[in-house]
Amino acid sequence: MREWSDEELERYSRHIILEDVGIEGQEKIINGKVLVIGAGGLGSPIAFYLAAAGVGEIGIVDGDVVDISNLQRQIIHFSSDVGIPKVESAKQKMTAINPHVKVNTYHTMISADNVLDIIKPYDFVIDGTDNFATKFLINDACILADKPYSHGGILRFSGQTMTIKPRVSACYACVFNAPPPAGVVPTCSTAGILGAVAGMLGAIQAAEALKFITGVGTPLYNTLLSFEAKNMAFRSVKFAKNPKCRVCGGSGITHLQDYEQAVCEVKHDKNS
């Protein structure tokens, strides 16, 4: 058991008094290492909540800079940050809310050439990206590297998420198989996104990471959780692991590839 300062005990007191978390659970959080890929609409609330919770080491990956159009939903960035790399802007806010956390920044885009090296040091990976190409690449890399991760996608008023544990649960490709052709799916820049929807889904993904680290509750394995914010309808769909999945089934993948880019998806049931 580590030595706790009075400041830490007070800072994390609301976790510590939780019967299912306690001092042991908070110690697991402090020893945890989580990678957030994307410092945008989803990555903003995810990074904030992980830092506030005291996750000891947080990596954040994004190759973009802050644009004024981001500020409607990317709450970790402020007006004064326009033009600054998103990872640096995010790190400033994360260490401001909790100086105890270590934040590693990667000002780069994820690719087949770098993703395995980037995810290697972390216990859990969170996909906060806005395009199919990167989502499928993250899934492939996490399956290949045996890294559990949270998938998230948002569009307009809708969001979806599922948590993947290699060799245990269905993976992203079990459910969606392959990216759609470029240009078929609308983008957040053309179809729009309600800013608060990003916050709703990001908070859920952060909770999934904390659940995994502490061992509390049941992660969204084999479950796609989706919601429609217009009427606040939530829906959970169960999926089985596909034994013929091109990524995690049979002999599985042996190498990574970059996919053709298509942006910001969500799978939405017409009847919901």
Image (cartoon, rainbow, N blue to C red):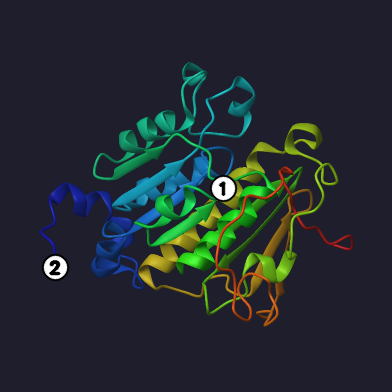
The residue under the point 24% across, 44% down is 100
The residue under the point 78% across, 53% down is 231
* Image x and y of residue 49, in percent: 43, 48
Residue 90 — which label? none
The residue under the point 51% across, 38% down is 39
* Image x and y of residue 107, in percent: 45, 34
- Is 70 situated above or below 22? above
Residue 1 — which label? 2
Residue 128 — which label? 1
Q: Is residue 170 visible?
A: yes
* Image x and y of residue 214, in percent: 36, 68
- Is 243 situated above or below 257? below
Total marks placed: 2
Identity, as a three-letter code, of the amino acid under mark 1: Gly
Identity, as a three-letter code, of the amino acid under mark 2: Met
Relative depth, front residue between 72 and 145: 145
- Is 62 situated above or below 125? above
Q: Between marks 2 and 1, how big is the CA–CA gap?
A: 33 Å
39 on left or right of 2: right
193 on left or right of 257: right
Q: Closer to the N terminus: mark 2 or mark 1?
A: 2
Tag 1, which secondary structure?
loop
Category of crowding for the residue at label 2, using alpha-carbon neighbours closer than 10 angstroms: few (below 14), some (14–19), many (at least 20): few
